Amino acid sequence: MAKKDDRIELLQGTLDMLILKTLIFGPAHGHQIGKHIQQTTENILQVQHGSLYPALHRLEEKGWVISKWETAPDRHREFKYYRLTAAGRKQLLQEESKWKKMARAVAQIMWPGEA
Amino acid sequence: MRWRRRRDHEAELDRELRSDLELEAFEQEEKGLSPEEARCAAKRALGNAGLIKEEIRAARGWGWFDRLWLDVVYALRAFARAPGFTSVVVLTLALGIGSTTAVFSVVHAVLLNPLPFPNQNRLAIAFEQSINRPDDAPFADSYRDFENWKNGSRSFELLTVATWSVGPQILTGAGQARDVLAMPVGIDFFPALGIAPEVGRTFGQDDLNAGCSVVLKHSFWKETFAGEASAVGRSVEINNEACSVIGVMPPEFTFYPGAAEMWMLITPNSPIARNPGAPVVVFGLLKPGVTIRSAQKELESLYKNSPRSDLGPLGQQIKPAVYPLAEQFARLTGPTLRLSLILLFGAVSLVLLISCLNVANLLLGKSMFRQKELALRAALGSSRTRIVRQLLTEGLLLSVTGAGLGVVLAIAAVHYFQVLNPIAMPPGNPARISLPVLGFTSLLVVVTTLLFGLIPALKASRVDLMEGLRVSAQAAAFNRAARSLRKGLVVVEVALSLALSVAAGLLVQSVQRLASVPLGFRMDRVSTTQIILPGWIYSTSEQRAGFFRTALKQPALASSGVSAAFASWLPPDGIGGDAVAIEGRSAERTRTGVPDVLQVSVSPAYFTAMGEPLRVGRVFEDTDGEKSPAVAIVNDAFGRKYFPKEDPIGRRLRVLRGRGSDPPWLTIVGIVGDERRQDFFRPMSWEEPPMVFRPVLQEPPARAFMVIHVDNGGTTLATTIQKQIRALDNNVVVGSFEPLDQRLARTLSYPEFRAVILTAFAVLAVFLAAIGLYAVLSQLIAQRTQEFGVRMALGAQKNDLLKLVLSEGIALTSVGLAVGLLITLSLAGFLSSLVYGLKTTDPWTLSAGSVLLLLVALFSMYLPALRASKVDPKVALRYE
């Protein structure tokens, strides 16, 4: 686990993009999504439940994901699985390109030679 | 539906978060923690589940509903804790909103949406008006004008004509002969109004060549034909002529005057069409987009090309005047109706404003005591908008409840208004609590809530946490600011109450003065009725004179202690409109002057019956018949105007009516006292028109009044007389007798109604202001109890404290009175046409109003002041 100082607060709106990206690999429930983001970034990005669940419901309200209660393959109980919609896919592409542009722009200022 | 979805979602949300919690605990357990520790760790990881759910609800857009619901529940709990306060507030609002709604329902029916016709905004009516005296009431057009305008005008889609100046119309063949108003109208009358008949049809081209045809009013159809559809095709007998019924209008159809029971087509053979000077009103449906102003211009130029010839040189001095039809029914019904309604609506708005100020005041007072609660809420994270919203929700609940109660009050008030029928209302839409009126009430709810809710809410939400949470909240600076605000509100309340009281005082005195003017005739024990001679039997002057001679010989009229007489016009109605020529003077001088002489035919006993004094000469005698020399009696006003320096007795005059054959010369044989009469279009004044009386046998009218005065006040005689005259001729219409003072009371009904309602509003306003003053002073004392204790401990006497509180109250009242006097003086001009016999700035009324308010204020100060003087220093110093 990373030390407390290494953790980074997510930028506004970034969480939505990360959730959408996570769901590209297939449907997942809230716990899995949180854990996925956390583990993939080696615990640098900590997703609070207080942000994760409101974000999921916000995405569903906007129609980018849909949810369904389904039985997990490894456990004999139901979880609320979130699944990407076509609109969600489109949104993800947009967010991605926006994010890339921004990252490049920041990089151009921070490390002028490298870009 | 929404609730259902909501509850499902809530359950699902719980389940989702719980499954996360369980999964987390399971994973922690796998890492080797004990089940207990694992559950705690999972809970820590999840954080505040309530907060998460709240945020999810916000994300889903349910948040406002939750908050509103919480606010409502919270407000209801707060109200239940203070039932006294709540009921005072709700009652105050109910009175304010209820009376405003009631007055608005009448304003809506009479001024805003008066005509039950489609296209009511395109209907315009044309009168004629004196060019030199534009303030005079507009008068009727002539039938020739109608023909000219109909041919020349391009402004109207349909131009039509109607008149209510008709000779006697007697309905026979349906029981006792009675008079009826069968209003003559043009062929486009119904199409212009856009109303289809309920049964049958309205007038068509073919009817112009047929005999008399009529369209019935719904109520007449119900009464006379029992509502049977077969009425169409049958006929009614009017003036001995069979008029075929071609249609029946729907029940809601009505036109001015409301007394019309049927509408009769004007054909080329009608007397109206054959008399070019026949008085009519022209009205029509403007083409879309044509304004009143351009129609006015067009008719003016048409009139200039062919002015009226029937009025002689006067025809050059008038012009057409076009108005929206919508405002004219009200003017024709009561010339002061419009102004009265505007006045009453203004007054009731002030009452509502005072109610709001009072409620704001009470809420503000309460919020002083709620400082701690609000500070605590702010400390726990309530935002300012959240607190304002909470307070506004409370306000909205109060005003919605008040409005609900107010609407019930308004429905009752409008119902009683319809039942008691205190004033004549114009035909058209009746006053009722309709949907648009309820819409207005909802608007009132919003406005009042903002008015009384926003001030305290904004004030209270600016909470200083430190000050608010401190134990002695009363000392907070907030309270000083709120106190001065509350004092300001009381000052405004006192000021507005003064304005209303003075206005009410002026109107009440006007009615008293109007009613107490000596009218020149007596009213006690005098009763009157109308008699109409059918024109088809009594067509000549000789025939009519014959009837009157026989009638005057009936035994009942000669009973002892009775004076009975006929008169063609009875006061207070009727003002002069005829010109006279005096023998030996040039005709020009009298002809071109303003025609202001009133000619009345009376039988000899008239002056005795009416108690009018004979100044010089003689009254009429039975010998003043058709064959005796033509004589006249004039009154003082006539003498003053036409014989200022000479003796009129023995001089000769003639009354010029229209341009007919030369009227006879009349020798003046006597002078009597003046009668006061009233111009319908100038109801707040009495006039003494110059009058010429003629013997009823020499100038017998077709319509006459009978006046009887019975010394002992008995009423059985009236019935006997009625029977004996009816027995003379069954076709003669004899009405029932009515005391003369009742006739007079009708002329006072508008001023009385205004005065009564305005007084009620003024009383309400003063009462509310007194409550406001009382509340402010009591709370002021409650907050200063400690200070008073200290003062007493330091040696202040009871009287000193009494004086302290009283001087505070008197200062507030005086400022209020000063402001009120300024408001009153600046608005006084508005009342001038409704006031009689005194100025709108009458110093007595102004001072009486101020003294009254001061007394009421002293009374409401008394209790709080007494309480202040009874403060026990020992208790007060411990008081917190």
Image (cartoon, grey):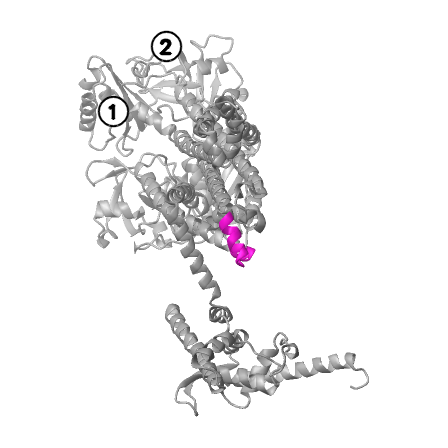
Q: Judge if badges 2 and 1 mark residues of a common chain.
A: yes
In three-dimensional space, the C-alpha distance between marks 2 and 1, rounded to whole angstroms, equals 27 Å
Q: Is B143 left, or right, of A14 in this rendering?
A: left
The chain letter under disc 2 is B
* Position above or below: B605 against B801: above
**Vertical comparison of B716 with B415: above or below:** above
Identify the residue shown where x is 56% and y is 55%. Answer: B384
On the question of residue B633 being in view, the answer is yes
Residue B89, given in percent of the width and then of the height, sits at: 42, 43
Residue B272, horizontal then vertical, whole percent: 39, 40
Query: Where residue B614 is drawn, which disc sits there?
Result: 2
Mark closest to the chain's N terminus, 2 or 1: 1
Secondary structure found at label 1: helix
Mark 2: give few (<14), some (14-19) or many (20+) Cα within 10 Å: some
**Picture coordinates of residue B170, whole percent (x, y):** 27, 36
Query: Horizontal placement of B148 versus B198: left or right?
Result: right
Question: What is the span of residues highlighted in magenta in the rendered image?
Answer: B372-386
Mark 2, secondary structure of its residue: strand
